[in-house]
Amino acid sequence: MFGKNYRRSIYQLALIPIFMGGFTVQANTPIEVSAPEQLIAKVHSATEVGLNWQAPKDVEGITGYRVFRDGKRVGRTKMTFFIDTSASPNVEHAYHVVAVAKGLGRKISLPSNIDSVRTLKNDDNEGLRNGSVIRVGIARLVDHCGTNDIDAIPEQELDTCMDKLIEHYTLREGLADMQAYAARYRRQEDQELIELGKRLFFSKALSQNFDTSCASCHHPAESCGSDGLSLSVGVNANDPDIMGLGRTDGQVIPSVGRSSPQICNTALWVDSMFWDQRVRLREANRDSDVGTVSTADIQTPELAVTRLMNEEVENTDPLRLLMAQAHFPITAPAEMGDPSGFESPQAYREFIAQRLSEEWKPYFHAAFGDEQVSFLRIARAMSAYQASFMFIDNPFFDYIDGERQKLNEAEKRGAMFFYTGAGCANCHDGVMFTPERTRGPLYPQIGAHGVADGNFKNQFRMPSLLNVGITAPYGDKGVFATLERVIEHYSDVTGSLERFYGQNETCGLAQFQHLNAEQCAQVVGDAGEYVLALNAQNRAASDRSDEAIIRGFTPQQVGYLAAFLRALTDPEAIAGSNEINALIPPRDGGPDGHQFDAINKEGEAL
């Protein structure tokens, strides 16, 4: 990335005087107006980069924009988007734009922010694999690094050792797959559809009582598209505009029984949606095809939705899993609305769709070419918006691509331990860090569905670890506040479960710290006895002794693993980035005045 000095040099170049026939002429004289904002560059291929930005605020007379790559003008447009079709393969390019305004001479605005991206190496990859894999067994550190002691490897040999592990786990090939997959999605993005989806995602008009939006539990500025709560709070919030800590319906036990999954990278999933995979492909990919886009039929908990998705939506539609998923929060009584008074849940969804006011029709016309409103169109638009939450660039991936300085010593040792002795790669292999399957170990359970949550042995879909550094609290019930506590759980599951319930750790979770001990016990309910009994059954059925499944990580090893996991976070996924800000609509109330313009518990805008 270029810094402030680069931006200043552009401004100064624009002020260089040109002497012509005794006259001094200012070339491209900047005008003292705000610059174009939120320039975002996205890789489309080895030679194409898509750009979009926001127009300067409070500026009239803009006639167009000039687009610059690496300081050289490469195009102009009257729109606030541009596709550079002449980029170089496998090169990091830096882009900025300036606005051109009416007036005497040619006047330009100050330059926008600069955004840098690296193009794909080539276009040989069709982009149909997300980087997920399933392997049996893990690598032994001694086979690749000559020792089983992470701390015994000299610092100067860490990169050599890491290269061997990267090759063993085919991480470069997996990363190329994921990057091509993301580029394919970005080539297909429709900005008008995404804009409609963004407005709908933030609209409380999609809830029964006009008090909850999708963004109420999945806000871009919190936890990569979650809410930062252990158990989410949907309808009937005391203050429906509060998001995250402080959002409450006044009940001791939140009515939503699970933690809201992050929205970031949900478009990477190709097999299923939701913690319990209740929306999934009817025929799951074989282990050899894990992570590959499939045209198999979709299965959902509702026959009408299943038929709709398989009969009305093309099986090659990249948004179809997300579209199927979008049907169910709307009809979840604790989340957004209760369809029980309607002929069917689908009838309720169409009621919600037709209830949208006239002010929405221009948005639908811009996205679809006509003003027709249906819930399937609503689902498509929200899915397009949700799919744009693609955040896969992180220090570890940069390291895989050869930028050795992107990881420090602790992060490298953590990566080596992750892929060898810690056993993490048994479940979180590949660059997606999940095989898109359910698997243990058993996590503590609390809340409205703490007992028998409807999933076999409470084994939920293994989450991806991308951006895991910013997605706390962790687990299907948000029971662990830090990565270190998660790692300790994997070190000794039985001891961790006994500690969680014995030391009443529920009271230590941020959402429940204001409760007294008796109220915390209500949040846990019978889940403690249920989970401890279930864990005892699992141990009895295992052919391994308790000692064999206690890994006993040292504090140093826990620190190494946590450092590595935090290196899987895309800086652009952090609240305040241009990419995150672009996912939040202007605080203008939306088309009909029902927009969720979120605030935190202090009343500050998010």
Image (cartoon, rainbow, N blue to C red):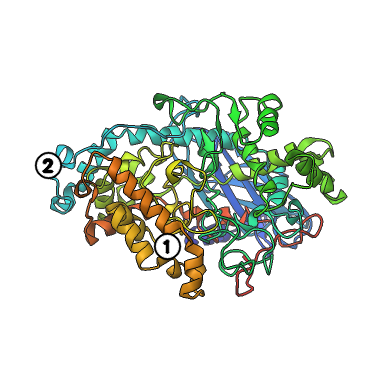
Q: Quadrant of residue 159?
A: top left
Q: Residues within 10 Å of mark 2 (few under 14, many from 20)?
A: few
The image quadrant of residue 381 is top right
Using the image, determine if residue 317 lies above or below residue 417: above
Q: Residue at x 27, y 50 (%)?
A: 412
User: Which numbered marker is on residue 491?
Assistant: none
Residue denoted by label 1: 481
Between residues 126 and 491, which one lies in front from this camera angle? 491
Comes first in the chain, label 1 or label 2: 2
- Calculate the distance from the C-alpha at mark 1 to the C-alpha at mark 2: 36 Å
In the rendered structure, the answer to whether residue 602 lies left or right of residue 509 reads right
Q: Position of residue 483 (x, y in %)?
A: 37, 58
Label annotation for residue 146 = 2
Q: What x and y, as percent, mark residue 54?
A: 67, 53
360 sits left or right of 67 in the view: right
The 10 Å Cα crowd at callout 1, few under 14, some 14 to 19, many 20 or more, is some
**Amino acid type of the residue tagged 1 in the rendering:** Ala
Tell me: 422 left or right of 172.
left
Q: Nearer the viewer, mark 1 or mark 2?
A: 1
The image quarter containing residue 308 is top right
**In front of the other: 447 or 383:** 447
Q: Tell me the kind of residue under disc 2.
A: Gly
Percent coordinates x, y for residue 11 in the rendering: 58, 60
* Residue 106 shows in the view: no
